[in-house]
Image (cartoon, grey):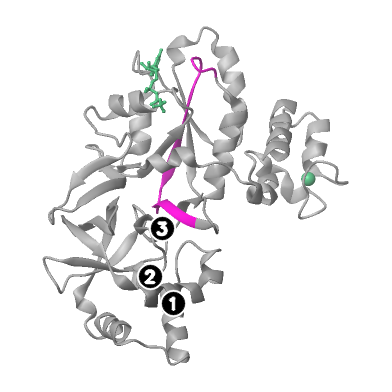
């Protein structure tokens, strides 16, 4: 990072701690108001405002290192670099641009394309990087849904883990689909139905699958068709097997995939959107494995715990933790037999261990 850029980003440190997406217009206005307006930024403003036709809307379908990305621009795909105006906010490309982002691309310098603006995100998956100060890194943006892969056995179905994934999905405002795989290993379907009843009653989409005998694969495919989906889940539950059954030959990112871009520079793929032949994308980002609930998430868990949206609006206190408060609708539901004590136990475990 250039010395000049360093100084500039330092000035905005306070803002950057709490946001994932820099509000570029506001920053521009601030610069304008304080008389700060480099010729470079003035030039860019001109492009945006005077020659708007040169900025095209595209979608980021691959994020690489070295400030490179691949963009779907109308019906073609182009490689693009990330404009300096965006670069100044973070020192990692993935820190500012996420796969799935809708962006404005400067096409006036063809064949060099440059990302100039990130358009507002509908949602995004954020992780915090460890470092001297907390930095937010967006792993993916504008996601339609997240598949939470679990298995009936091997490894055994763990509702507590499902709850944590569901809280995460709710936190990021992404529709969850609960997939219970390996049902070929199930001998007692009443027991299985009992285990998933709570999630179904809470209005969630639950799909039972087996890669071994093919049950549920068509149903899952229908849910994915035409939508952009992230796959998450318990290791060993069968994510890769399911994806392979849905779309044989799809190459997932395992660790870091090395590649050489046109300029011959060494780059690595950090996240990619892989098209399904039946429509829609699989958003593949290895970073998802690093997502965990944080201590800072604790205040939102009472509202985001799966199924609690039926109860908490009736709690006497708006910030009710459902642990000791009088007039708590969650505790009342449990006493009245309207809430499975095992789900409440899971809630308490998460609250105590987050
Ligand atoms: N019986 C049975 N085994 C399955 C099924 N799906 C996957 N498996 C097996 O479960 C094991 C783990 O499957 P993977 O697809 O590698 O699981 P994963 O979730 O991608 O695992 P990670 O890479 O650790 O995240 C493999 O041995 C699969 O053959 C299924 O529906 N039934
Ligand atoms: Zn309560």
Query: 102 or 42, which is in the foreground?
Result: 42
Contact, mark 1 vs mark 3 (Cβ under 8 Å):
no
Q: Which residue is mark 3?
A: 95
Mark 2 Cα-neighbour bin, 10 Å: few <14, some 14–19, many ≥20: some
Asked if the residue at label 1 sits under 8 Å from ligand 1, the reply is: no
Asked if the residue at label 2 sits under 8 Å from ligand 1, the reply is: no
Q: Residue furthest right?
A: 326
For residue 169, say whether it is visible: yes
> What residue do we see at 37% from left, 66% from top?
119
Q: Which residue is mark 2?
A: 88
**Whole-percent x, y for residue 41 in the image:** 32, 82
Query: 298 or 153, which is in the foreground?
Result: 298
**Whole-percent x, y for residue 12 in the image:** 50, 74
- Specify the label residue 8 is tagged with: 1
> What residue do we see at 54% from left, 12% from top?
189
Sequence-first disc among 1 and 3: 1
**Whole-percent x, y for residue 200 in the image:** 57, 31
Is 150 inside the magenta-drawn segment? yes
Q: Mark 2: which secondary structure?
A: loop
> What residue do we see at 44% from left, 41% from top?
288
Mark 3 Cα-neighbour bin, 10 Å: few <14, some 14–19, many ≥20: many
Figure quadrant of the N terminus: bottom left
For residue 293, what is the image quadrant?
top right
Which stretch is magenta?
136-156
Disc 3 to disc 2, C-alpha distance:
11 Å
């Amino acid at each position: 990072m250039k010395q000049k850029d360093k100084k500039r980003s330092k000035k905005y440190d306070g803002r950057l701690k709490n946001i994932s997406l820099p509000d570029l217009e506001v920053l521009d206005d601030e610069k304008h108001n304080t008389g700060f307006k480099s010729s470079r930024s003035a030039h860019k403003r001109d492009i945006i405002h005077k020659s708007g036709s040169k900025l095209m809307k595209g979608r980021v379908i691959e994020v690489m290192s070295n400030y490179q990305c691949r963009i779907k621009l109308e019906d073609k795909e182009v490689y693009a670099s990330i404009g300096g105006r965006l670069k100044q906010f973070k020192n990692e490309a993935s820190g500012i641009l996420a796969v799935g982002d809708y962006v404005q691309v400067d096409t006036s310098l063809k064949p060099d394309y440059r990302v100039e603006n990130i358009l507002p995100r509908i949602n995004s998956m954020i992780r915090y990087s460890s470092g001297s100060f907390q930095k937010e890194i967006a792993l993916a943006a504008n996601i339609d849904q997240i598949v939470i892969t679990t298995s009936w056995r091997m490894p055994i179905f763990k509702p507590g883990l499902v709850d944590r994934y569901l809280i995460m999905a709710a936190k990021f405002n992404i529709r969850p689909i609960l997939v219970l795989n390996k049902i070929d290993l199930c001998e007692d379907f009443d027991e299985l139905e009992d285990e998933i009843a709570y999630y179904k009653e809470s209005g969630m989409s639950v799909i039972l699958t087996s890669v071994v005998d093919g049950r549920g694969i068509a149903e899952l495919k229908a849910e994915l068709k035409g939508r952009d989906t992230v796959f998450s889940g318990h290791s060993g539950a069968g994510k890769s097997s399911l994806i392979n059954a849905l779309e044989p030959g799809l190459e997932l990112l395992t660790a870091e995939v090395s590649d050489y871009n046109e300029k011959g520079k060494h780059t690595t793929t950090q996240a990619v959107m892989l098209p399904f032949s039946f429509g829609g994308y699989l958003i593949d980002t290895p970073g998802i494995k690093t997502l965990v609930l944080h201590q800072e998430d604790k205040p939102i868990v009472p509202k985001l715990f799966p199924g609690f949206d039926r109860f908490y609006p009736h709690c006497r206190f708006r910030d009710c933790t459902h642990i000791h408060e009088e007039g708590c609708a969650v505790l009342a539901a449990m006493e009245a037999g309207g809430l499975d004590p095992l789900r409440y136990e899971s809630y308490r475990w998460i609250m105590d261990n987050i």
